[in-house]
Image: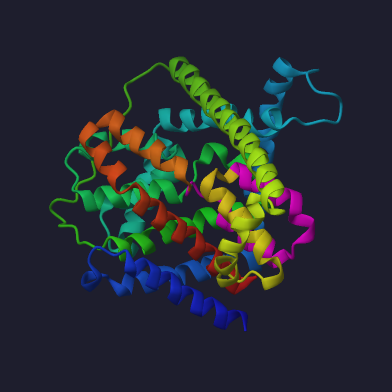
Amino acid sequence: MKYIIAIIALIVVFILAMLASSDRKHVKIRPVILMVIIQLILAFLLLNTRFGLVIIEAVATGFGKLLEYASEGINFVFGGLANEGQAPFFLSVLLPIVFISVLIGILQHFRILPFIMRGIGVLLHKINGMGKLESYNAVASAIVGQSEVFITVKKQLGHLPEHRLYTLCASAMSTVSMSIVGAYMTMIEPRYVVTAIVLNLFGGFIIASIINPYSVDEKEDILRVQEEAKQSFFEMIGEYIMDGFKVAVIVGAMLIGFVALIAMINNLFDLAFGRSFQELIGYLFAPVAILMGVPAGESVVAGGIMATKLVTNEFVAMMNLGEVASEMSARTLGIISVFLVSFANFSSIGIIAGAVKGLNEKQGNTVARFGLKLLYGATLVSVLSGIIVSFVL
C-alpha cells in the first residue's frame, strides 16, 4: 500500500510542478525520470544497506569529532556560564558553526573545495541535462551557503537570463550549507541529514526542470568561477571566524524572535479558538503529510511541524520535532526529518534576493519578483525528498 501512495504522491508533485511550469511543452522527461531513479537508489543505499550505514556513521563520527574540537574553544571562552550537565542551545548547537566555517575557509584557501565542486558539477551536468553553471552552483550552494555561493559566480551573474537565474536561486534554497550540517546533526538523526542533502541535490534539478525548462547552448555554457582575492592564511582564518560567528548570532537572533512570536500566537489562538496556531495550520498541511507517507493519525502534528518550517525556519521546526519525536513512529520521524533539511522558507526569499542584489541590483530585483515561485519550487523539492524516503522506510 505504501508504494501505491508514494507513486500517487510522485504524480501529484509532478502535476503541481507542471501547473507552475513556464513551458510545459519543453519539459525533458528523460532526465527527470533518470534523476528520480537515482534518488530512489541513493535513498535505499543510505538508509537500508550496510554500505550506507558505514558511510553515514563515518560522516556522523567526523562531524562528532569536529563538534568536540569546537567545544574546546567554546568551553575556554564560555566555560562556567552554564550549570554542570546543561547544554544551552547557543553554545552547543550554534557556536560550533564558527569552527566549521574556519575549516571551509581552509579548504577554500588551498583550492580543495573549488576542485571538488567543479568535479561533482561536471558529473551532475551529464545527468541532469542542464548547464555546467547550474550544476556547479548546486554543489557550491550545499558547501559554501545559499548567499555566499553567488559570489563565486559573480562574473556571470549580470549576464544570466531570468530562467537560468531562477535555477541558480532554486538550488540555493533547496540545499543547506555545510557549515550548519553539524548543528542539524545535534537535533535530528545524522542519517536523515545526509540523505536529505543528497536527495535535495537531485530534487532541485528535477523540480527546476519541470517548472523552468530550457536548453543551454554548449558554446555559451562556460563556467567562470570568481576566485577570492588573495589573502594570507591568517587573514583568511580571521575572516571565516567572523563569518561563522555572524551566522551563529543571526540564527540565534532569528530563533529568539520566531520562537517567542510563535509562543505568543499559539497562546492567542488557544484563547480565541481553543486550538494553538500550529495545530490549526497542521490541519492544512496534514494532506501533504499523508501524501508523503505519514500515517493519518500523525499527519496533523507532522503537518504543523512542516508549516512551522515554511513560515519560520528549519531550526524552529527541528526543535518542535524534538519535542514530539517520542510520540511519532520511526517512519514519520524519518520522512519529516528529511523534509526539514533545506532552506525552503519565506525568510530565504529575502536572503537570496538580498545576496544577489548586493552583487547586481537589476538581477536582485528579478529574484525578488519570482520569490514566491522560488519558494513554491523549493517546497516541492522537500516534499519530493520526503516521498522518496517513504519508498524505502
In the rendered structure, does residue 67 fall within the stretch colored magenta? Answer: no
Query: Which quadrant is home to the C terminus?
Result: bottom right
The answer, for residue 119, to whether it is visible in the render is no
The residue sitting at 42% across, 38% down in the picture is 113
Q: How many marks?
A: 0
Residue 258 image-quadrant placement: top right
Residue 264 at x, y percent in the picture: 66, 38
**Quarter containing the N terminus:** bottom right
Q: Residue furthest left?
A: 219
In the picture, measured across the screen, residue 185 lies left or right of residue 150, that is: right
Viewer-closest of 134 and 346: 346
Residue 257 sits in which quadrant? Answer: top right
Q: Residue at x 48, y 24 (%)?
A: 243
Q: Which of 220 and 13 is in front in this view?
A: 13
Q: Residue at x 29, y 43 (%)?
A: 367
Q: Where is residue 116 in the image (x, y as percent from the top left)?
A: 41, 44
**Magenta residues (range):** 315-344
In reply to whether residue 325 is colored magenta, the answer given is yes
Kindly tell me whether residue 344 is visible in this rendering: yes
Relative horizontal placement of residue 96, taking residue 239 as reference (left or right): right
The x and y percentages for residue 246 are 52, 24
Magenta: main secondary structure: helix
Q: Given the current orientation, which residue lies at the most extreme front position?
A: 272
**Residue 17 or residue 194, whichever sits in front:** 17
* Vertical arrangement, residue 356 with respect to residue 40, above or below: above
Q: Which colour scheme is used?
A: rainbow
